[in-house]
Amino acid sequence: MSAETNHFALFGLEPRFAIDLDELTRRYRDLQQAVHPDRYASASDAERRLSMQRSVALNEALQVLRDPLRRARHLLALRGLEWEDEYETRMDPAFLMQQMEWREALGGAREAADPLEVTGRILDEVSAERRRIIARLGELLDGEGAPEEAKGLILQLQFLGKLIQEAEALEAELEEI
Protein backbone atom coordinates (compact mmCIF):
# COMPACT_ATOMS: atom_id res chain seq x y z
CA MET A 1 0.00 0.00 0.00
CA SER A 2 1.37 3.40 -0.86
CA ALA A 3 1.56 5.98 1.89
CA GLU A 4 -1.03 8.20 0.23
CA THR A 5 -3.65 5.47 -0.20
CA ASN A 6 -6.34 5.88 2.44
CA HIS A 7 -9.40 3.79 1.73
CA PHE A 8 -11.36 5.49 4.51
CA ALA A 9 -10.81 8.93 2.95
CA LEU A 10 -11.99 7.62 -0.41
CA PHE A 11 -15.40 6.99 1.20
CA GLY A 12 -15.31 10.04 3.46
CA LEU A 13 -15.07 7.86 6.57
CA GLU A 14 -13.07 8.38 9.73
CA PRO A 15 -10.22 5.86 9.90
CA ARG A 16 -11.62 3.54 12.55
CA PHE A 17 -11.88 -0.21 12.92
CA ALA A 18 -15.56 -0.07 13.89
CA ILE A 19 -17.40 1.04 10.78
CA ASP A 20 -21.01 0.84 9.70
CA LEU A 21 -20.93 -1.66 6.83
CA ASP A 22 -24.35 -0.56 5.57
CA GLU A 23 -23.13 3.05 5.39
CA LEU A 24 -19.96 1.88 3.62
CA THR A 25 -22.05 0.00 1.05
CA ARG A 26 -24.30 3.03 0.51
CA ARG A 27 -21.33 5.32 -0.04
CA TYR A 28 -19.73 2.76 -2.36
CA ARG A 29 -22.87 2.60 -4.52
CA ASP A 30 -23.12 6.38 -4.69
CA LEU A 31 -19.47 6.78 -5.65
CA GLN A 32 -19.49 3.85 -8.06
CA GLN A 33 -22.54 5.28 -9.81
CA ALA A 34 -20.68 8.56 -10.34
CA VAL A 35 -17.46 7.02 -11.70
CA HIS A 36 -18.71 3.86 -13.39
CA PRO A 37 -17.09 3.39 -16.83
CA ASP A 38 -20.50 3.04 -18.52
CA ARG A 39 -21.15 6.72 -17.76
CA TYR A 40 -18.03 7.59 -19.75
CA ALA A 41 -18.68 5.47 -22.84
CA SER A 42 -18.66 8.50 -25.15
CA ALA A 43 -15.92 10.38 -23.27
CA SER A 44 -12.30 10.75 -24.32
CA ASP A 45 -9.84 7.89 -23.87
CA ALA A 46 -8.23 9.69 -20.94
CA GLU A 47 -11.58 10.20 -19.20
CA ARG A 48 -12.55 6.56 -19.75
CA ARG A 49 -9.19 5.40 -18.38
CA LEU A 50 -9.56 7.66 -15.34
CA SER A 51 -13.09 6.37 -14.77
CA MET A 52 -11.84 2.79 -14.92
CA GLN A 53 -9.02 3.58 -12.47
CA ARG A 54 -11.43 5.20 -10.02
CA SER A 55 -13.83 2.29 -10.29
CA VAL A 56 -11.04 -0.21 -9.62
CA ALA A 57 -9.83 1.87 -6.66
CA LEU A 58 -13.35 1.94 -5.20
CA ASN A 59 -13.71 -1.82 -5.58
CA GLU A 60 -10.34 -2.47 -3.90
CA ALA A 61 -11.13 -0.03 -1.08
CA LEU A 62 -14.50 -1.69 -0.49
CA GLN A 63 -12.89 -5.13 -0.27
CA VAL A 64 -10.30 -3.89 2.24
CA LEU A 65 -12.78 -2.08 4.46
CA ARG A 66 -15.37 -4.87 4.50
CA ASP A 67 -12.87 -7.46 5.74
CA PRO A 68 -11.90 -7.02 9.43
CA LEU A 69 -8.43 -8.49 8.86
CA ARG A 70 -7.61 -6.30 5.88
CA ARG A 71 -9.20 -3.26 7.54
CA ALA A 72 -7.03 -3.73 10.65
CA ARG A 73 -3.86 -4.09 8.56
CA HIS A 74 -4.84 -0.97 6.60
CA LEU A 75 -5.32 1.03 9.80
CA LEU A 76 -1.91 -0.01 11.09
CA ALA A 77 -0.33 0.82 7.72
CA LEU A 78 -1.90 4.28 7.86
CA ARG A 79 -0.24 4.63 11.26
CA GLY A 80 3.11 3.63 9.81
CA LEU A 81 3.24 -0.02 10.90
CA GLU A 82 3.60 -2.49 8.04
CA TRP A 83 5.38 -5.85 7.93
CA GLU A 84 6.03 -8.87 5.78
CA ASP A 85 4.21 -11.91 7.18
CA GLU A 86 6.88 -14.39 6.17
CA TYR A 87 9.40 -12.63 8.42
CA GLU A 88 7.05 -12.44 11.39
CA THR A 89 7.67 -15.45 13.64
CA ARG A 90 6.69 -14.22 17.11
CA MET A 91 3.38 -15.64 18.27
CA ASP A 92 1.64 -16.03 21.58
CA PRO A 93 2.59 -19.54 22.83
CA ALA A 94 -0.90 -20.15 24.28
CA PHE A 95 -2.46 -19.28 20.93
CA LEU A 96 -0.06 -21.58 19.09
CA MET A 97 -0.90 -24.45 21.46
CA GLN A 98 -4.64 -23.89 20.98
CA GLN A 99 -4.22 -23.76 17.23
CA MET A 100 -2.23 -27.01 17.27
CA GLU A 101 -5.01 -28.67 19.30
CA TRP A 102 -7.64 -27.52 16.78
CA ARG A 103 -5.51 -28.72 13.87
CA GLU A 104 -4.98 -32.12 15.50
CA ALA A 105 -8.71 -32.44 16.20
CA LEU A 106 -9.49 -31.43 12.61
CA GLY A 107 -6.94 -33.91 11.32
CA GLY A 108 -8.60 -36.72 13.29
CA ALA A 109 -12.18 -35.70 12.54
CA ARG A 110 -12.63 -38.24 9.72
CA GLU A 111 -11.95 -41.10 12.16
CA ALA A 112 -14.39 -39.79 14.81
CA ALA A 113 -17.73 -41.52 15.42
CA ASP A 114 -19.47 -38.35 14.17
CA PRO A 115 -16.99 -36.45 11.97
CA LEU A 116 -19.48 -33.69 11.13
CA GLU A 117 -20.11 -33.03 14.83
CA VAL A 118 -16.38 -32.77 15.51
CA THR A 119 -15.84 -30.48 12.54
CA GLY A 120 -18.82 -28.34 13.53
CA ARG A 121 -17.56 -28.03 17.11
CA ILE A 122 -14.12 -26.95 15.88
CA LEU A 123 -15.71 -24.39 13.54
CA ASP A 124 -17.79 -23.03 16.42
CA GLU A 125 -14.76 -22.73 18.71
CA VAL A 126 -12.53 -21.15 16.07
CA SER A 127 -15.29 -18.75 14.98
CA ALA A 128 -15.85 -17.70 18.60
CA GLU A 129 -12.11 -17.03 18.98
CA ARG A 130 -12.17 -15.05 15.74
CA ARG A 131 -15.04 -12.89 17.05
CA ARG A 132 -13.14 -12.32 20.32
CA ILE A 133 -10.03 -11.22 18.43
CA ILE A 134 -12.01 -8.90 16.17
CA ALA A 135 -13.61 -7.28 19.24
CA ARG A 136 -10.19 -6.82 20.87
CA LEU A 137 -8.80 -5.35 17.66
CA GLY A 138 -11.61 -2.81 17.72
CA GLU A 139 -10.69 -1.85 21.27
CA LEU A 140 -7.03 -1.46 20.38
CA LEU A 141 -7.37 0.28 17.05
CA ASP A 142 -10.15 2.65 18.05
CA GLY A 143 -9.05 3.36 21.59
CA GLU A 144 -6.10 2.10 23.54
CA GLY A 145 -3.49 1.99 20.82
CA ALA A 146 -0.95 -0.81 21.43
CA PRO A 147 -0.05 -1.36 17.77
CA GLU A 148 2.26 -4.31 18.53
CA GLU A 149 -0.57 -6.15 20.30
CA ALA A 150 -2.87 -5.34 17.39
CA LYS A 151 -0.24 -6.70 15.00
CA GLY A 152 -0.09 -9.95 16.98
CA LEU A 153 -3.87 -10.25 16.87
CA ILE A 154 -3.89 -9.66 13.12
CA LEU A 155 -1.44 -12.51 12.68
CA GLN A 156 -3.65 -14.72 14.85
CA LEU A 157 -6.67 -13.72 12.79
CA GLN A 158 -4.83 -14.84 9.65
CA PHE A 159 -4.14 -18.25 11.20
CA LEU A 160 -7.77 -18.60 12.26
CA GLY A 161 -9.00 -17.65 8.79
CA LYS A 162 -6.94 -20.43 7.24
CA LEU A 163 -8.15 -22.89 9.86
CA ILE A 164 -11.78 -21.93 9.23
CA GLN A 165 -11.27 -22.46 5.48
CA GLU A 166 -9.78 -25.91 6.10
CA ALA A 167 -12.60 -26.86 8.48
CA GLU A 168 -15.27 -25.64 6.06
CA ALA A 169 -13.65 -27.59 3.21
CA LEU A 170 -13.61 -30.73 5.35
CA GLU A 171 -17.20 -30.17 6.39
CA ALA A 172 -18.27 -29.82 2.74
CA GLU A 173 -16.35 -32.98 1.85
CA LEU A 174 -17.95 -34.92 4.72
CA GLU A 175 -21.44 -33.75 3.75
CA GLU A 176 -20.93 -35.22 0.28
CA ILE A 177 -20.18 -38.67 1.68
Image (cartoon, rainbow, N blue to C red):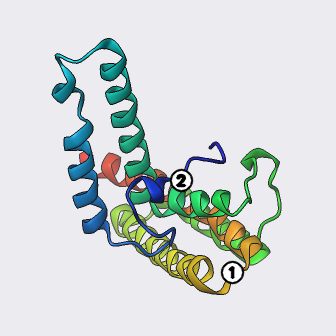
At a point 35% along the width and 66% down the height, the residue shown is 114
Q: Can residue 111 be seen from the camera position used here?
A: no
* Callout 2 secondary element: loop
Q: Nearer the viewer, residue 102 or 88?
A: 88
Q: Nearer the viewer, residue 68 or 10?
A: 10
At a point 55% along the width and 65% down the height, the residue shown is 105
Looking at the rendered structure, the kind of residue marked 2 is Asn
Q: Can residue 120 be seen from the camera position used here?
A: yes
Q: Residues within 10 Å of mark 2 (few under 14, many from 20)?
A: some
The percent position of residue 2, horizontal first and vertical second, equals 64, 42
* Callout 1 secondary element: loop
Image quarter hosting the N terminus: top right
Tell me if 88 is positioned left or right of 150 in this view.
right
Q: How many discs appear?
A: 2
**Label placed on residue 145:** 1
Relative vertical location of residue 4 with respect to residue 39 in this rendering, above or below: below
Q: If you read the primary sequence from the N terminus, does the residue marked by circle 1 or circle 2 appear first? A: 2
The percent position of residue 171, horizontal first and vertical second, equals 35, 55
Tell which tag, 1 or 2, sits nearer the viewer. 2
At a point 75% along the width and 47% down the height, the residue shown is 84
**Label placed on residue 170:** none
Q: Nearer the viewer, residue 166 or 153?
A: 153
Looking at the rendered structure, the kind of residue marked 1 is Gly
Relative vertical location of residue 104 with respect to residue 56 in this rendering, above or below: below
At a point 46% along the width and 58% down the height, the residue shown is 9
Image quadrant of residue 116?
bottom left
**Label placed on residue 6:** 2
Outermost top residue: 45
The percent position of residue 34, horizontal first and vertical second, equals 22, 41
The reply to whether callout 1 and callout 2 are in contact (CB within 8 Å) is no
Q: Residues within 10 Å of mark 1 (few under 14, many from 20)?
A: few
Q: CA distance from mark 1 to mark 2?
A: 19 Å
